[in-house]
């Protein structure tokens, strides 16, 4: 028996500018950009359920950005999510694949995914 749970607690996303990242991510999630930046480099995105998301400018470098999506953000409306990000001039890197998912980049070059669940 293992003392390690088979559950992901939090994902850290490397970002260059923590204040800008806080505003950008809160905007795409439809959240108010409220909350404290901790220790000058961390921002915890308020999540409703499941895995947490932490933006971290201390770990950012060209080598640490996500070159492929390591996780996905859930949606129940894949076409709506695609059009929403496209309307925000977010760099979309794939079309909607199999009517199920698409990939995009954040302003720092991290490759991210939205998936219909």
Image (cartoon, rainbow, N blue to C red):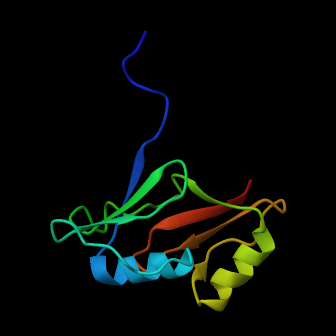
Write the residue at 54% across / 57% down. Answer: 48
Quarter of the picture holding the N terminus: top left
- To which quarter of the image does residue 17 belong? bottom left
From what the image shows, is residue 40 above or below residue 8? Answer: below
Relative placement, left or right, of 22 versus 8 is left
Write the residue at 44% across / 53% down. Answer: 52
> How many numbered tags mark residues here?
0
Picture coordinates of residue 51, whole percent (x, y): 49, 49
Picture coordinates of residue 64, whole percent (x, y): 32, 60
**Residue extending furthest toward the right:** 99
From what the image shows, is residue 38 above or below residue 51? Answer: below
Picture coordinates of residue 14, whole percent (x, y): 33, 64
Name the one closer to the observer, 28 or 108. 28
Relative placement, left or right, of 9 versus 29 is left
Write the residue at 77% across / 68% down. Answer: 78
- To which quarter of the image does residue 16 belong? bottom left
Q: Is residue 42 visible?
A: yes
């Amino acid at each position: 028996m293992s003392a390690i749970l088979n559950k992901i607690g939090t994902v850290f996303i490397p970002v260059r500018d923590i204040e800008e990242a806080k505003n950008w991510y809160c905007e795409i999630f439809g959240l108010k950009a409220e909350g404290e930046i901790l220790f000058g480099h961390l921002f915890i995105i308020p999540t409703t359920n499941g895995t947490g998301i932490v933006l971290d400018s201390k770990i950012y470098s060209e080598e640490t950005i996500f070159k492929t999506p390591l996780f996905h953000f859930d949606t129940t409306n894949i076409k709506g999510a695609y059009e929403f990000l496209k309307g925000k001039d977010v760099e979309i890197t794939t079309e909607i694949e199999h009517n199920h998912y698409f990939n995009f980049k954040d302003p720092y070059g991290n490759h991210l995914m939205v998936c219909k669940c």
